[in-house]
Amino acid sequence: MLAGKAALVTASDHEVACAVAAHLGIFDEVHGSADGTNLKGDRKAAAQAREKAQEMRKRARDAEAELERLTAERRAVDQAMAEPGSAEPRYAKMTMTELMKRSAEIATALEQAEAAWLTASEALEPLEAAL
């Protein structure tokens, strides 16, 4: 599972929020009221929506990168099964049974990466529409 960032978003003074965040040590980002900007109500909701959208974009990008990596590996395994003489070194010594097992593992991982990408993309759509 992909981990997201934890943000402290409060209408309290930014300096107070930073002190609380430093004391707790669990937040990646801190957003508080400062310089005449009060993060309450709609502004707080907008800040939270931006944070969530950023997290979903990262999850989608990470899933896309995993899909690309797995697709390349699947091509290499398929090549090793079809033409063992031209297989990448890491697959050249594998038996057909081992290659088939690895191919099945890759197929499962691809399904999981596709599901992660779809989940992140679907969660992102309403967030971006609200921004």
Image (cartoon, rainbow, N blue to C red):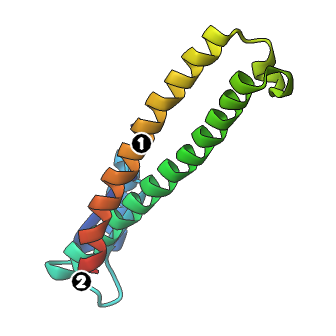
Left or right of residue 63: residue 5:
left
Q: Residue at x 44, y 29 (%)?
A: 108
**C-alpha gap between disc 1 and disc 2:** 32 Å
List the residue tagged with mark 1.
2
Q: Quadrant of residue 86?
A: top right
Residue 28 spot, x, y in % from top left: 43, 55
Q: Residue at x 55, y 44 (%)?
A: 66
Quadrant into which the N terminus falls:
top left
In this view, the residue in front, 119 or 54, is: 119
Kindly tell me whether residue 77 is visible in this rendering: yes
Q: Nearer the viewer, mark 1 or mark 2?
A: 1
Crowd around label 1: few <14 · some 14–19 · many ≥20 (10 Å): few
Q: Confirm or deny contact between disc 1 and disc 2 (CB under 8 A).
A: no
Above-or-below relation of 13 to 52: below
Q: Quadrant of residue 96?
A: top right
Residue type, mark 2 in image: Asn
Quadrant into which the C terminus falls:
bottom left
Q: Which mark is residue 38?
A: 2
Crowd around label 2: few <14 · some 14–19 · many ≥20 (10 Å): some
Residue type, mark 1 in image: Leu
In this view, the residue in front, 30 or 82, is: 82
Left or right of residue 83: residue 102:
left
